[in-house]
Amino acid sequence: MNKERKLIIAGNWKMNKTVAEALDLAAGLKLELANVKEVDIVVCPPYTALSEVSKAILDSNIRLGAQNMSEHNVGAYTGEIAAVMLKEFSVRYVILGHSERRQYQQESDALIARKALAVHGAALKPIVCIGETLAEREAGQTEQVLATQVRGSLAGLDKEQMVETVVAYEPVWAIGTGKTASPAQAQEAHAFIRRVLAGMFDETVARKVRIQYGGSVKPANARELMSLPDVDGALVGGAALEARSFTDIIKNSI
Ligand code: 13P
């Protein structure tokens, strides 16, 4: 597939996989994906498996991501994880502001923006998630919600940092529901997000930023979604938990 931007396909393992299970999956992916060069491949295990998975994918084409990070560098923040701790395991990417964290941990755009700055401060790359709920889409508020999230969650980044940031468009109604956005809905939302980025930064920056689609991505719909002009990858949940389906998503996208 000939794309303007290199595809980035990431697996968000969420709160799944013990260390033994994570190692099993990592070994399968390493074997199956060894020859893939056309796509940036990222896996985001839970914190407890980062150390072992990091060792397992050493010398492979698979990069490591975390699912969250503290905005602070060190100190009395019980239960939090700092950038320097992630760097010990060669983490390269950090998912920020996933809709599950926005919903269950009340993460705000302002907090996500501070975390994004902390991620860049540590020379890591954030994957910043945005997306509307079903109620917002049905009320015709999708563009307004996306614009607010883009402007709020990426506030304060400079142009160089923005180019090194990945945006993940994950319509909340498509996450874990089996309901994928139609190609037209996905393309429309991605193109809109890029226009907002052009307004915030400039056209050159907007053209370089990779925007992933997330929400019930499967081997069967990956090719069509990845072929859309403004879709530059995928953030995969359920289908990233098995080597076969995650591999097929990547191979079907090439
Ligand atoms: P599903 O692929 O399970 O719908 O999850 C998407 C997601 O939330 C990835 O971050």
Image (cartoon, grey):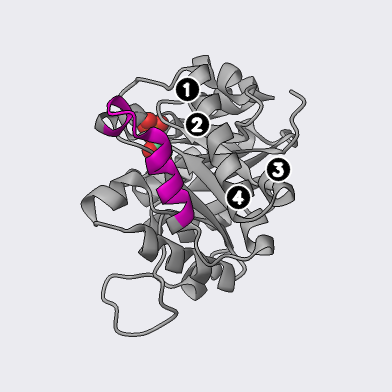
Q: Which residue is more in the foreground, 141 or 2?
A: 141
Q: Identify the residue under disc 1.
A: 185
Residue 54 is inside the magenta segment: no
Q: CA distance from mark 2 to mark 3?
A: 15 Å
Residue at 34% across / 48% down in the picture?
Answer: 18
Q: Are marks 2 and 3 in contact (CB under 8 Å)?
A: no
Disc 4 packing (10 Å; few <14; some 14–19; many ≥20): few
Q: Quadrant of ligand 1?
A: top left
Res 17 quadrant in image: top left
Question: Which of the 4 image quadrants contains residue 251?
Answer: top right
Disc 4 from disc 3: Cα separation = 12 Å
Marks 3 and 1, the one that precedes in the sequence: 1
> What residue does disc 4 label?
199
Mark 3 lies on residue? 207
Task: Say which amino acid is labelled 3.
Answer: Arg
Of labels 2 and 3, earlier in sequence is 2
> Three-letter amino acid code at disc 2?
Ala
Q: Which amino acid, mark 1?
A: Gln
Q: Is residue 133 visible?
A: yes
Identify which residue, 166 or 81, lies in the foreground: 166
Q: Is residue 28 visible?
A: no
